[in-house]
Image (tube, rainbow, N blue to C red):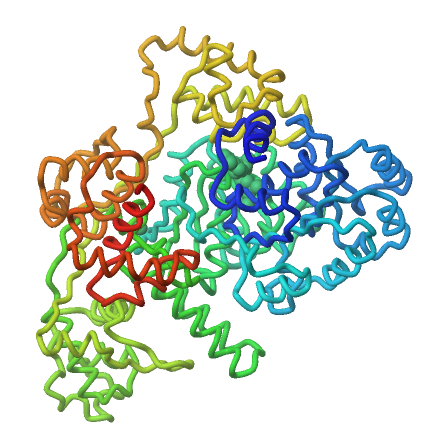
Amino acid sequence: MITEATTLLKQHFGYDSFRPGQEEIIINLLNSHRTMGIMPTGGGKSICYQIPSLMLPGITLVISPLISLMKDQVDELNEAGIAATFINSSLKNNEVNERLEQMKQGGYKLVYIAPERLETPSFLHALSQLHVSLIAVDEAHCLSQWGHDFRPSYMKIPNMIEQLHDQPTILALTATSTPEVTADICSALSINNDFLVKTGFARENLSFNILKGEDRDSYILDYVETNKGQSGIIYAATRKEVERLYTVLESRGISVGKYHGGMTNEERESMQELFVYDELQLMIATNAFGMGINKSNVRYVIHYQIPRNIESYYQEAGRAGRDGEESECILLFSPQDIRIQQFLIEQSTLHEGRKDNELRKLQAMANYCHTESCLQSYILDYFGDSIIEPCGKCIHCRDERDSEDVTTDAQMVFSCIKRMRENFGKTIVAQVLVGSGNKRVKDLSFHTLSTYGLMKDRTQKDVSQFIDFLIASQYVSLSDGSFPTLQLTEKAIQVLKGEIRVERKQETKKVTVVKSHPLFEKLRELRSSLAKDANVPPYVIFSDKTLNEMCAILPTNQSDMLKVKGVGEQKYEKYGNIFIKAISEFLEENPDIEKNNREYHTSPVIRNKNADVPISHSKTPSHFISSSLYKEGKTIKEIAEIRSITPMTVESHLLRAMEEGDELNLYSLVSDEDKDRISKSVELIGVEDGLRPIKEDLPEDISYFSIKIVLQQLATN
Ligand code: ADP
Ligand code: ZN
């Protein structure tokens, strides 16, 4: 069964293997189990019903609220040689009837509809005469009132299903679902908990970056110039800001569009279309832009201001790299923005409980900006993912700067907070520490405290930022509400007692380099002109990922071309020769280009301010550098020192190298006693819910690293 599915995957979509979760969902469906799939954006949800639709008799009905996407999705399927159509309000009555007639004749395997269609009796009647084998409910969180996007017409779905006389199999899909929402969906669609398939929220191809203290406009101009030819989105907080940035960029001759709530529907639609069709390189938008955009080759998303919460940030930033290619998410941070967001929340008409909740969420967003640990891990932890390891590619994981011991400074801050009875906010604590003559400080007699003026050689702003760092690193916590006060956590007490030390990265110097393969531009242009002829968006022909792979493999014959991910037989027949010809021409013009040269597309790296290291991009991926040092006999600590990275990062490198087939003897790193405890715990608890329950069951000194090593060993035995 699954071999047939794999063959179809290759034949129609040109992919060799399934992504996490896909296979399990497909097997469930082929065995007629109602299933729910929670996968991140870009995780490949569509394949989960598209492949079964080809294997099941009858029709697969796809219910989706995103009307603007349907045409593209159907075009994409038709390109891949799959008979599909859509029925929505953009069609005239006679067109709807024609398509219904075709459905009866067995003309389509897949039919996309908007949920509102289920309120049309004539449609329901037509449906009852058909054989529907599978119903895929996309954006299934719209079914729940707890979800962030409830749609009443989704409530009609269970009813409609009941009216069909052959009971179809159901697949509910979403990228965002809290446990409450999941329970709602499963109960509405009678999905058994055993058939809930959840992959993590991690997006492995995204590198997260926060830049502080940049001149934002010149940073953006620079970045857009360096990444010419790549698609990007810039999110700004207000219409006014969008207009201003748009003017700045347009006056420099940059191919840019804009999108916000103050424009007419037509203006917005036309901008969106130009962007999707690669006619515009860059889109500047408020958060109104994005829902329902399926553009897979967005290479970067820049936030000009911080969003209100991590949910919005991850959703917006997550529009980068849906094709799985390396992409960047950059947040340009200014502390002022937090105050503006706070002000907006306080001024809003929300009731007090909701306000506090929003302020808490904003604080989590602020902590994201001040943390010096892995950014991807921070986000995953926020969403309750269980497997959390440094990603190895965010700005903090790539940070090659040395750390400084700042324990003494931290102790000064903590004792000041303590002397002020943990009853005051950040601003006044910083004022007391720098010895400010501020009236409020005097009125409260804080100038008589022994900690008054302890840090008088610093500016108030420096001290304030240092406190932000201590909050983000969980030494200091904040009370709820509009005027949060600072409290010491257990960790801070340990620092005060001298039991643990505090480290912080030195000041930064930033370097940005991104370059794309010289052939890429040529293939991109070819793709654009083919797309125009076929009147489809360019990514429907081939994704950026596929073009990049062509640049790496440089296929000049049929069998090599078919090895490229994304080139199936159907696509090969249509476009294979044209692309082979372009690649052959390019090789003739550039005889020095090597095959399998994957060094292009690199990311910003930050280094010590004073270290004058030349910018060189090693061809060996970072995790393999760590693993070869390990094989030379270096310990994890030594590797961390040699490479100026944290031991945690080295551990994640070693695991990754091992997963990718490097033979490393990591098993010997775990003591026999720990191996025993971990195996027992795994046996007792299982791995269905990830590693967190296992970790929690074990003594605290047993790390995720040890658990993963033992699991790997158990899996290969
Ligand atoms: P989602 O709906 O989950 O956001 P899509 O279904 O749009 O994601 O898929 C995202 C991208 O991943 C698409 O370009 C798709 O062709 C690609 N993709 C899906 N499954 C696979 C796979 N097994 N191997 C490689 N690429 C895949
Ligand atoms: Zn990271």
Q: Nearer the viewer, residue 509 or 145?
A: 145
Relative to 556, residue 303 above or below? below
Q: Nearer the viewer, residue 322 or 171?
A: 171
Relative to 699, residue 257 above or below? above
- Identify the image quadrant of residue 630: top left
The answer to whether 392 appears left or right of 121 in the picture is left
| Picture coordinates of residue 633, whole percent (x, y) | 9, 39
Q: Residue at x 40, y 6 (%)?
A: 588
| Picture coordinates of residue 105, whole percent (x, y) | 86, 33
Q: Quadrant of the C terminus?
A: top left
Q: Residue furthest top?
A: 588
Number of marks drawn: 0
Q: Nearer the viewer, residue 450 or 571?
A: 571
The answer to whether 351 appears left or right of 684 in the picture is right
| Picture coordinates of residue 619, whole percent (x, y) | 25, 28
The answer to whether 492 appears left or right of 525 in the picture is left
- Identify the image quadrant of residue 348: bottom right
Q: Nearer the viewer, residue 393 or 60?
A: 60
Relative to 43, residue 481 above or below? below
Q: Quadrant of the N terminus?
A: top right
Examine the rendering and report whether any part of residue 355 can be seen.
yes
Q: Residue at x 34, y 21 (%)?
A: 596
Relative to 478, residue 135 above or below? above
Q: Residue at x 19, y 83 (%)?
A: 437
Q: Residue at x 54, y 57 (%)?
A: 176
Examine the rendering and report whether any part of residue 297 can be seen.
no
| Picture coordinates of residue 566, whole percent (x, y) | 52, 27
